Image: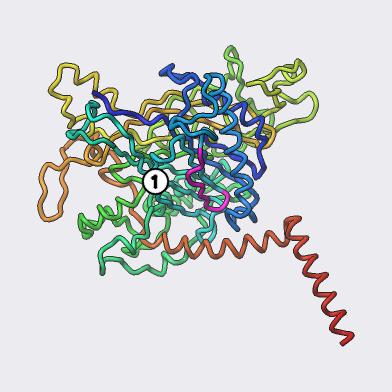
Amino acid sequence: MTPSTIDLLILTFNCAKNLINVAVWAAHLKAALSAQGVGKGNGNTLPDVVVFSLQEVAPLAYSFIGPFFLNTYYARYGEALNLAAGQLLEEADEYGTSSDGASGDPYKLIRAKNVGMTAILLFAREPSKIQRIEEAECGFGAADMGNKGAVGLRVTWSDVVDGNDNAITTTTEQAKTTELTFVATHLAAMEWNLKKRNANWRSIVSGLTFANPRNVLPAGEFPSESRAARSTPDRSGAGDTAPVARTRDDSSSADADDHTDLAYGNGDGDSDAQPLLNNPRASASYKSTLQQISIFKPTSHLFLAGDLNYRIDTTTPPPLATYPSFDPSSGNHFSHFLPRDQLTQEREAGRTMHGLSEAPITFGPTYKYDVHPAKGEAVNEEAVKRGDKVNGVPEVPWRFASHRWPGWCDRVLYLDVPPWVTATTELEQQPEAEAEREKVKVEVEVYDSLPVVETSDHRPVFFRAKVPVLGEEAMRLPLVSEGEGEREVEEEEEWKRDPRVSMPVAVDVHAWERRAAARRKEVVVGWTAFLWSTKEGALVLATLLVMGVGSWWLLRDW
């Protein structure tokens, strides 16, 4: 009676601008693919879709130039994934044959997309089930450039089912479809930049659109851009020094700054900078059109993964600070530090990640690790000396960096199935209705971290879930009454809080075009950095110099 599901695995990792070791990653990915969690139903069963959210995927010069240089970095993740999946299939006597009977790698890269140093890779076992792909991007850096930013993919998944299959639908279609929206992001760093991280999230809600608003709004309804909106201030929050402590005399201005920051991210009073979706003068069709291209499209599932950079304090640790332990019997076990997590506090207070859910965290902090510290300083030194292995790979010696509080920076969140889906299904009239409705949700199977790797100061985090295949009709917000374009919903508090009913931040209709302008700047910055900061660039300059000198020498004799 329940809908069919998509087996989804999402992994987020801050790559620290380094290439990965394919063999090591394959060993860890194999453990992730076979991990058995809540449902205890994975084993050697491979997920249908795998998504990698990668931050600092490559040096800035390569990232700003684009795919020509990034493909080398992307390829290693594909190699590691297929190596791990192939080993699992070989153990199940299935290696060499995909689910559709074709030989070759178990997974195919469907789409790779980056904004600056943040990238998203989408793999599928059966590429034919991915029928439509849309892209989105936004930058948080100076002039909207992508040293920090977010990149999104929205895909339509087609699930071929038997005509007699029982699901939440009133038809007997041979193919059911559902939309999946994936967002990979890297938010502002530093402990004290909590408000900047929240502002980055609001930039994602307002600026990460899957189409240019100018192209989707009816003619004559696209507003002009105000002078303040064109200023494009640096919203990265990636400062190098902590802010000066406020005094009592600063309280009034501080309160004003907080109000402004929460409102939209700037202090301009121009109506164009105000939340358009909450503007009573905006028509219902105007609001609906913009929401359809936002991350909170009402008929799409949503998953967000990345280095969200939320910490456990707003200041750096003092000398001789106590750090989390992985020993369950210790009074300093990491579980005692988890209540200080900024993301959980801000999300529950309604200041960030509006409407998103997160599975319980049972793993330790994922940042910041000093890899291969001085002799005698590694937390796991005894295990390293014994030659202990994790997933068949020798343990990497590590300790927590002394100048940063360890934190759960790397996270995966999701928007669960809308509450009105389970409240309007045909199952209500059946005795077993309540039990059936409980199953119509995103069922998280595993949420865990992978071991420390040599190439990064972050630990990878992975998430595996069963996502129900629900079409537009099942996901769409039901109407109580409809007239003159006004939409009304049932007066249920749970519905009102859902961001698919009322978006927390307005869609910035000018963000798409500002991002296009920022991309042109990135290319200039990228090539400049390439020429002056890389070995390849030095070789190009040297070659040009030799050619110039040689040409001058030849022309001189003429």
Eyeballing the image, is 297 above or below 433?
below
* Quarter of image, res 27: top right
Asked whether, in this view, residue 528 is left or right of residue 502, the answer is right
Residue sitting at 65 percent across and 62 percent down? 527
Query: Could you tell me which secondary element the residue under label 1 belongs to?
Result: strand
Residue sitting at 80 percent across and 65 percent down? 542
Residue range in magenta is 108-117
Q: Position of residue 189 (x, y in %)?
A: 56, 44
The residue labelled by disc 1 is 154
Q: Position of residue 220 (x, y in %)?
A: 26, 69
Asked whether, in this view, residue 75 is left or right of residue 558, the answer is left
Front one among 145 and 544: 544
Q: Quadrant of the C terminus?
A: bottom right
Magenta stretch prevailing secondary structure: strand
Q: Position of residue 218 (x, y in %)?
A: 25, 64
Q: Furthest-right residue in view?
A: 557
* Quarter of image, res 127: top left
Residue 308 shows in this picture: no
Residue sitting at 43 percent across and 36 percent down? 126
